[in-house]
Image (tube, rainbow, N blue to C red):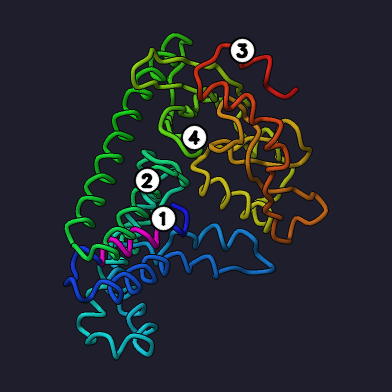
Amino acid sequence: MDILTQGLLGGVLAQAVCKDDEKKTATLAGFAAGLLADADVLIHSSSDPLLSLEYHRHFTHALIFIPFGAALAALLLWPLLRKSCSWQRLYLFCFAGYSLSGLLDACTSYGTQLFWPFSEARIAFNIISILDPVFTLALAISLVAGLWMKQRVLALYGLAFCLLYLSFGKLQQERASLLAQHLIEERGHSAVSHIVKPTLANLLLWRSVYRDDERIYVDAIRMGVFSEALIYQGESLPIFSFEKDMHWLETDSLLYRDIGRFIRFSDGYVANDPTQHNVIGDIRYSMLPISAKPLWGIRIDQTRINEHVDYQFYRENAREVRPAFKAMLLGRDDVKELVPK
């Protein structure tokens, strides 16, 4: 989730375990501890752009790291808060604030290494967007109300609402997955792997991405609460392969290894960007749910096969796709006319 939501969740969790006269101290400690897991964004290399990808949501988000993350947060906050509470209480607040950072991120679609160092698998439950205003607002109201009224039960109410909201996301995902599976069967395809995940800031419009043996297919599914579901069929692209697309590349080159790293990070959902020359993109993400144009990718330079690849973001057409996105979110049938050419 976004960093604000992580902090708010940490603050509310700390409120849930504190006494009424500890609310301010607990909220500050929990909020700060909730942010700390995302300090992994500071791990980067100017010479190796993919390093930041590999370490984002890595060991700082692992379940086994929670006690150590809490201790680090408490150490950083101790000079500021030592007159307000004991070390034991401060550690408790930081532990509570840090405890669900990794699990909350795993509820999104990016992938989180919850079980590091025992497994490098990236866990993604795909039940909530990385940015969800309803979820964030619920936490904000709960945190502010808890500070104002100094009643721990308000934090529990806020956490209960968030749990129900995540459960609703899971229900929506299962409904959308069922429709996506029917669509795959109607096309006569056999999906090697399949992802259904929410689009930005809502639980109504979902993006379906699946791979068969040769192509990646993208579709959008609008799951209304009291209305019929709608399917917006999208684009498809040939899956990238070294044998087909870069047979000339030496397997011991740095470029070959970097492409392999990007393929592993993208869980195999990689293809040549249809609109940009020499760009291999992660097709799981796009500005428009029915588009195969990636949000990010790596640029290939055949003259630099022993240098690290450039990792780039592509969000310059956000305004152009907004009308089509809004039309799908509202369940309209004029989407094709609104999609940018």
Q: Compare marks 3 and 2 and give the one earlier in the sequence.
A: 2
**Distance (Cα) linking label 2 and label 4:** 14 Å
Q: Kindly identify the residue that appears in the image at 36 percent across and 70 percent down.
A: 33
Residue type at the position of mark 4 = Thr
Q: Residues within 10 Å of mark 1 (few under 14, many from 20)?
A: many
Left/right of residue 74 with respect to residue 315 in the rendered view: left
Q: Is most of the magenta stretch helix, strand or loop?
A: helix
| Residue 5 marker | 1
| Residue 317 spot, x, y in % from top left | 72, 37
The residue carrying mark 4 is: 199
Extreme-front residue of the structure:
149
- Placement of 24 over or under 118, stated as above or below: below
In this picture, is 225 found above or below 101?
above
Q: Secondary structure at mark 2?
A: helix
Q: How far from the left and from the top, in percent, is residue 50?
A: 60, 58
State the CA–CA distance, disc 1 to disc 4: 17 Å
- Crowding near pointer 3: few (<14 within 10 Å), some, many (20+)? few
Indicate whether 11 appears above or below 126. Answer: below
* Residue that lies at the very extreme toward the right in this rendered image: 303
What's the distance in space between the residues labelled 2 and 1, CA to CA? Answer: 8 Å
Secondary structure beneath dot 1 equals helix
Q: Earlier in the sequence, mark 1 or mark 4?
A: 1
The amino acid sitting under disc 2 is Phe
Q: Is residue 202 left or right of residue 240?
A: left
> Bounds of the magenta span?
6-14
Residue 22 higher or lower than 327, as above or below? below
Question: Disc 3 designates what residue?
Answer: 334
Which type of secondary structure does the marked residue at label 4 adopt? loop
Q: Where is mark 2, residue-wise?
A: 135
Where, quadrant-wise, is the C terminus in this rendering?
A: top right
At x 48% / y 10%, what residue is drawn?
187
